[in-house]
Amino acid sequence: ECPPGFIGHDCSVEVKECNSHRADLVHSCYFGSECIEADNEYGLLDKFCDCSRAHSEDGAFVAGLMCQYTSSTICVDDDKAF
């Protein structure tokens, strides 16, 4: 069994609990991503995982609702890089 804050077959994936304001939406933020409050697409305040500073064990960028997927590409906006 993994210690609190870690999951995986070798307990190497760091996770942080990220409870939404909605009781039916509870998830964890993977790979050191941070749980932040932000407006969702409907203009409602909710909690999400910010993947911008998170990386997998091999240094790859991550993406997804919980930052659980390794990104194969990096998107670049005119004003900022992700």
Image (cartoon, helix red, strand yellow):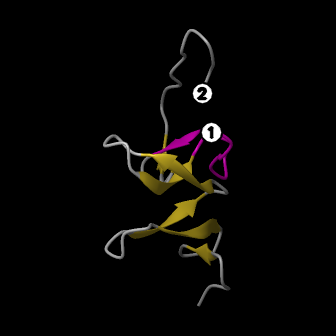
Comparing 19 with 63, the one in front is 19
Q: Which of the 4 image quarters holds residue 36?
A: bottom right
Q: Residue at x 43, y 68 (%)?
A: 21
- Figure check: 64 above or below 30: above
**Dot 1, crowdedness within 10 Å: few (<14), some or many (≥20)?**
some
What secondary structure is the magenta-colored segment mainly?
loop
Circle 2/circle 1 CB separation < 8 Å: yes
Q: What is the quadrant of the N terminus in the image?
A: bottom right
Label 2 crowd (10 A; few <14 / some 14-19 / many >=20): few
Could you tell whether 43 is left or right of 1 in the image? Answer: left
Q: Which residues are magenta?
A: 51-63
Residue drawn at x 67%, y 85% is: 3
Residue annotated with mark 2: 82
Quarter location, residue 61: top right
> Going by the image, does 80 lie left or right of 72?
right
Q: Secondary structure at mark 1?
A: loop
Instruction: Identify which amino acid the numbered label 1 is placed on.
Output: Ser
In the displayed structure, would residue 80 be above or below residue 3?
above
- The x, y position of residue 69, in whole percent, is 46, 48
Mark before the other along the chain sequence, 2 or 1 = 1
Q: Where is residue 17? Give x, y as percent.
A: 56, 72
Question: Residue 52, which numbered label?
Answer: 1
Name above or below for residue 9 compared with residue 39: below
The residue sitting at 62% across, 50% down in the picture is: 56
Give the residue drawn at x 48%, y 32%.
Answer: 72
Residue farthest toward the bottom in the current orientation of the protein: 1
Residue type for callout 2: Phe
How far, Cα to Cα, is label 2 from label 1? 6 Å
Q: Position of residue 48 (x, y in %)?
A: 49, 54
Tell me, yes or no, whether the highlighted magenta stretch contains residue 25: no
